[in-house]
Amino acid sequence: MTSSSEWQKMVNGELYWAWDEDLQANRERCKAACQRFNEAGQVSRRRKVELWRDIVCDTRPLPPVHPEPKEDEKLFDETDPVVDPPISVDHGLNFKVGKGTFLNFNLLVLDTCLITIGERVLFGPNVCIYGATHPIDPAVRRGLEGPEAGKEVHIQDDVWIGGSVIILAGVTVGRGSTVGAGSVVTRDVPPFHFVAGNPARVIRRIETSMDPEQSKEL
């Protein structure tokens, strides 16, 4: 499916035909994987990781089982995020999440193009990442008959995304930043800043020793 010409157009951010057979097949695969993850119930961390990796097509082998359940859970602290169901992801193949990250429930991801989330990132509930777009010109858009497009979204390390935040296509949220609950992020967020509102705007700079620029000033 990733060799499809429409798939290549999609991940490149070009106009593409969303009803392409290969694209639809992968969407159905991802939808089924999300359903299995969401309906798993109270299962071990290992099983949740297996189901999560099915969504994002992560084929890395799991580590050997540790006989102690708590120790077995710790094996995944340095390899995978913690994800609370339910989750809805469009393609999965274009969604990359770093270790030590927490994705809260009701996450919606339209990963038309690459969407990356770094390490040690915290998501509140009901976050939406809209990597998909449509042409503004209705003569080109043509409802279900016209093409679609998308742009990449990147959320860097050590970011906190508050509950019910919407992040639009083409946005980068810089390292160490915080996005206030309910915000709609329409443009890039500079590293180590707090933004909030609709559209989100910079409220203040975050004072932290993690910021190399602040270290230089000191």
Image: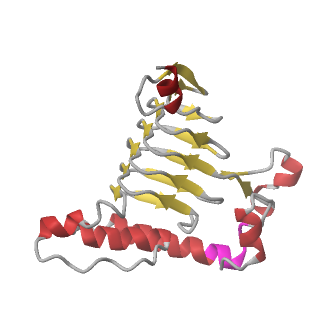
In the rendered view, tell whether residue 179 sits above or below residue 9: above
The residue nearer to you, when weighing 197 against 68, is 68
Residue 170, given in percent of the width and then of the height, sits at 67, 45
The magenta stretch is 18-24
In the rendered view, tell whether residue 151 sits above or below residue 80: above
In the rendered view, tell whether residue 151 sits above or below residue 185: below
Residue 90, given in percent of the width and then of the height, sits at 56, 63
Q: Would residue 42 be seen by someone viewing this image from the given angle? A: no
Residue 5, given in percent of the width and then of the height, sits at 78, 75
The residue nearer to you, when weighing 173 against 162, is 173
Question: Which residue is found at the position 10% from the left and 72% from the top?
Answer: 68
Question: Which residue is found at the position 48% from the left and 68% from the top?
Answer: 56
Is residue 168 left or right of 64 when viewed as pictured?
A: right
Q: Would residue 204 be seen by someone viewing this image from the given angle? A: yes
Q: How many discs mark residues in the rendered view?
A: 0
Q: Residue furthest right?
A: 139
Question: Which residue is found at the position 71% from the left and 71% from the top?
Answer: 7
Q: Quadrant of residue 206?
A: top left
The residue nearer to you, when weighing 106 against 62, is 62
